């Protein structure tokens, strides 16, 4: 991890403008927040923070992808999210002052803008719209978490896997127009996303490949028939 | 459901003072919010709102217990929480303006204080501490939801059941000093709390009864040996 020398402001201001939760800030508030924020760089696979560690800051992703996981005592883990540039993370411990509720790791090389609790709290006090955006962010996280919990509780592995692929394909389609959508997700990663085993995921993907719903090629998972996956998602 | 005639203010103000998220309000803000809030009464088993319905208000529980559930398309459901007096619910849809993310039902007769979105937003704009309390509430909900998700994904039924009983016993012990703790939880309810079947829960409870960890008597589930349950929780 490298703490980067303070850069000229425009980079930071542009990043804050691209972040949904800071988009509503007026220019003065954005400049003030940017002046107090600093960049950190992480190499691919480098841990950013551990679950259970103290956390007084949140991070906005300037470049790269950050993986959020919840490890269990048993050493197994569930992948909660892979967050691209423009997203933020670490807001829970920053806001409630407790331990980190999950672990964060740089999935690729990453550049992060770090915002300290005192500066975000000052912003909330100054700008109610920022508080409302943060509240909406947490509402979205909570909706997503409860949806996944009921999926894991009630759906069989194929339906959970189909839903995860449909969501990942929709996210990828937002970022690029290339069709068909190619996903860079290993079978072990998919297993950790749906709370199942690599073997179960492999069995399911092989069957869908035989039926022409997906293809597995050169390490890519290619979504050929999203409607066909939809049918499995609702079983 | 009955909408109750505006009552003299003190009841509402006292309830807001007992609610963790409104405790930090100054007296003027509390009086203003109380003046705009109104009581609704529900009979036991009456639905308060359905998942997917529009929701422009949140509720503070003045009396009774409210059950929050997430129903699946299949008709099965998971019990997310049983909330006693002093707790609030319905804040997610109120804050993000989307559909209700879960269903709420009166588990007992209930009296609720209803707070409309426009009044809560006005409060957030007026009082940054209220915004911070709401942010902390959502952080707590998110931590709880992710903890349950990883439990459902990785733990077997006995460990999930033991953790649920330990938490329910700790909550009950906070409200009453009677020992041993007696829980009024049917086996079907426990199954819907841990995302399993009544049969699995029954098999597990019978075994724990034989080993003296719990007793099942007159519809009560009596926790005799919390330490013994602890051992099952960590398997």
Image: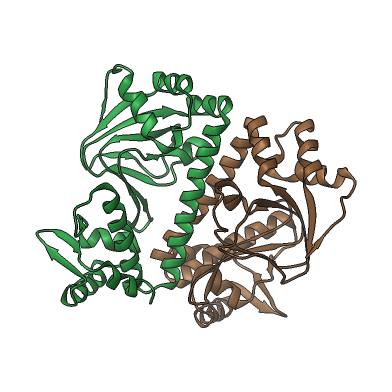
Chain colours: A brown, B green
Q: Residue furthest left?
A: B218
Is A189 in front, or is B64? B64
Is B21 in front, or is A198? B21
- Above or below, A112 relative to B66: below
Q: Position of residue A127 (x, y in %)?
A: 66, 31
Query: Number of labelled discs?
Result: 0
Q: Is residue A159 left or right of residue A69?
A: left
| Quarter occupied by residue B228 | bottom left
Q: Position of residue A144 (x, y in %)?
A: 52, 54
Q: Position of residue B187 (x, y in %)?
A: 22, 63
Is B84 in front, or is B6? B84
Q: Position of residue B203 (x, y in %)?
A: 22, 74
Query: Which residue is drawn at the image coordinates 67% and 51% (left, top)?
Result: A57
Q: Which quarter of the rendered picture does the N terminus of chain B lie within? A: top left
- Above or below, A6 relative to B96: below
Query: Which residue is drawn at the image coordinates 44% and 36% (left, top)?
Result: B54
Is B101 in front, or is A113? A113
Q: Which quarter of the rendered picture does the C terminus of chain B lie within? A: bottom left
Q: Residue furthest right?
A: A8
Does the image show residue B97? no
Query: Which residue is drawn at the image coordinates 71% and 48% (left, top)?
Result: A115
Does the image show residue B52? yes
- Above or below, B28 relative to B205: above
């Amino acid at each position: 991890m490298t703490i980067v020398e303070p850069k000229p402001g425009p980079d930071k201001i542009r990043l804050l403008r691209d972040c949904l939760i800071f988009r509503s800030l007026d220019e003065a508030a954005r400049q003030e927040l940017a002046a107090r924020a600093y960049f950190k760089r992480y190499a691919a696979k480098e841990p950013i923070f551990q679950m259970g560690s103290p956390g007084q800051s949140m991070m906005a992703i300037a470049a790269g992808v950050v993986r959020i996981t919840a490890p269990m005592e048993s050493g197994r883990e569930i992948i909660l999210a892979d967050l691209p540039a423009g997203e933020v993370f670490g807001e829970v411990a920053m806001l409630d002052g407790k331990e980190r509720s999950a672990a964060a790791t740089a999935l690729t090389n990453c550049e992060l803008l770090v915002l300290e609790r005192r500066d975000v709290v000052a912003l909330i006090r100054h700008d109610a719209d920022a508080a409302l955006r943060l509240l909406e962010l947490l509402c979205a996280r909570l909706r997503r978490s409860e949806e996944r919990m009921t999926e894991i509780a009630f759906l069989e592995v194929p339906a959970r896997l189909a839903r995860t692929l449909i969501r990942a394909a929709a996210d990828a389609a937002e970022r690029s127009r290339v069709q068909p959508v190619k996903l860079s997700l290993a079978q072990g990663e998919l297993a950790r996303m749906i709370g199942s085993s690599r073997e179960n995921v492999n069995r399911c993907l092989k069957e869908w490949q035989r039926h022409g719903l997906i293809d597995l090629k050169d390490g890519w998972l290619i979504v050929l028939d999203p409607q066909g996956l939809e049918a499995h998602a609702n079983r």
